[in-house]
Amino acid sequence: MLETNETLTEASAQQAPPGKKVDREFTVKERTQWQLAGRRFLKHRAAFISLIVFILLVLFAFVGQKLWHYKYEGDLLPTSEINAGPSSKHPFGTTDLYDEMALIMRGTQQSLKVAFIIAIVGTGLGALWGVVSGFFSGFIDSALMRFADLALTIPALALAAALARQGGGKLWLIGLILAAVSAPYVARVVRGVVLSLREREFIEAARALGASNTRIMLRHLLPNTIPVLIVNATLLIAAGILLETALSYVGFGIQSPDTSLGILIVKAQGSVQTKPWLFYFPGLFIILIALTVNFIGDGLRDALDPRQTRERK
Amino acid sequence: MLVFVIRRVLISIPVLIASTIVTFVIVKLSGDPLTPLKQRQSTASVEVKQRFIDQETHRLWLDRSWPEQYWHWISNVLFHNNWGEQVIGHDNIRTDVFHALWVTSRLVVASVFIALALAVVTGVISAVKQYSLTDYTTTLLGFVFLSMPTFWFAILLKEFVGIKFNDVTGTRTFSTIDEPDSWLSVHDLIAHVMLPTIVLGLVGYAAWSRFTRASMLEVLNSDYVRLARSKGLKPSTVLVKHALRTALIPLTTVTALDIAGLLGGAIVTETVFQWHGMGYLFVTSLRAIDFNVMLGWLLITATIVILFNLIADILYGILDPRIRHA
């Protein structure tokens, strides 16, 4: 994969001394693995549109909150404006206290923060776990993998709820718990990749050159698992966001003075018929976040999987 | 094969034991069961209250060390079939937990069958007609269901289907499940189970239809299917007898492994529909830190998951002749 690609470019660099133009029969512009993947990703229309929508969502949550003149906490709305449906002044309507759009911005922000924590901590932890497990076969491998099996015997939602109960709804804690819950999934996948990579020539070469175990793991094995990691990260993010909202729904997630998309739905579930805007908009945003992340993941899988040679129509 | 099965069963036992330890630690970390008692305002004197707290602490074995408590719990479960007492009240929780398990299994079994049937049909159709309009539509639908919070969809269903067709879906009728041998109770059972089953089934459906499609595509592009076609076999024979049979092998494994996820999904679904099964039991027991219930719940869930992992491995060995375990 990456490694073989590097050796190829090295080889071609040897043929062509700097400054001298190579005379080739077929002149095709050289492209790196990542450029090829990028092109494939752009061709996956749903993934590309999803990426744009996702960036818009990030802007909406983080920048929008600064610009929007209603707040999700603090000063309440005047009584003439509360419990009203969508209008030009309040695009998503109002609750009995606040502007719904401000609340949704806050909720989206919370969901995205959780997503980023899962993406960084969860996949990072899982990647290390998997690489160490796959690299050292034998006892360490068995121990680490049995521990992953163990973690997977408990339903993720139950595990997360039990651990989050004492946390008092701190966002970073919930993020970390969800990251820890999702790490074993990553570890399993990464281990599988590492097991096959370990036997390849470039690892043998690195070892022959005297590279230490740590160096082989961090510089040679880990970078080669990146395509798999990225795809899995997106799947985990989508699952994690849904898990966070489910956690809020059963009452062990982010706690009430603060808000999240899950809490907004819980509060609106009694008034689906009378104040539908309070129920539909938060749900729509959860779907939007999870759907775009899922599609981006699908696009990345198509783009990064080297076996996938067929172009999409 | 028999050797493999025996070895696989033996490997599961330490995993189950370790799982009970992890479970125990998690339950201990989740909070102090006597917090509500300690915080309660009462007219009784401090001394009396303290004595009551001490008494309860002693009854629940909370004054012992963790290893002692763990051993007390696990040995009672294993040797005396005694699953412990409630924190509030002195009833043994075994009947509660197993009743809840029975209630939930009705839900899970029905939804697994519906989800599998739907997933295989749509998965195969979208694989055979790859990149057609049907394929795109079912793929999009699958993605939407995969990205939809279960409870949001459940509430929607409850509000618009449940309330509108009250008599059919049985959201209003009283539960007559416990009166056996009557046609009414069967009808009532189906009516009550309908909406939660649809919700829970969709969770599985979304993932499994995607999986069937991928697995089917891989098989359809393989050489032996091309050979079967080139010998002039009927397309339907090739599809069902040659391709589908192979494509379904990995699905059995995935289905068995997803049982843990379904039990987790049941937590949310049962909370929405106030369905008094395992999920509901877990949420209420976690709110009150009714730790014996939580321990029992987690033990049963872990056992089920490990059991299904085992079944998945064994089934895989039976179904796929290429895999022969020594």
Image: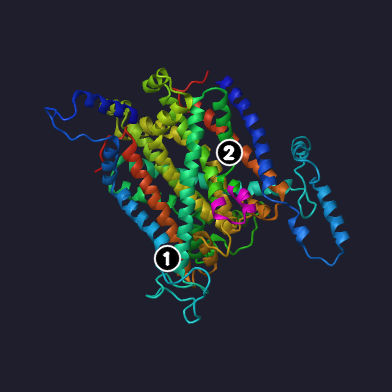
Give yes or no for residue A161 being in the magenta stretch. yes
Is B303 above or below relative to B276? above
Q: Can residue B98 be spotted in the picture?
A: no
Residue under the point 47% across and 55% down: A111
The quarter of the image holding the N terminus of chain B is top right
Give yes or no for residue B29 being in the magenta stretch. no
Query: For this rendering, which residue is in front, A105 or A277?
Result: A105
Q: Position of residue A215 (x, y in %)?
A: 45, 27
Q: Amino acid at mark 1?
A: Lys
Is B261 above or below relative to A137? below
Q: What residue did someone put label 1 on?
A: A66
Span colored in magenta: A160-173
Of helix, strand and loop, which one carries label 1? Answer: helix
Q: Position of residue A279 (x, y in %)?
A: 48, 65
The disc numbered 2 marks a residue on which chain? A
Q: Amino acid at mark 2?
A: Ala
Query: For this rendering, which residue is in front, B284 or B174?
Result: B284
* Of pointers 1 and 2, the one earlier in the residue sequence: 1
Query: For this rendering, which residue is in front, B122 or B257?
Result: B257
The dot on residue A151 is 2
Q: Can residue A76 be spotted in the picture?
A: yes
> Tag count in the figure?
2
Relative side of B55 to A76, left or right = right
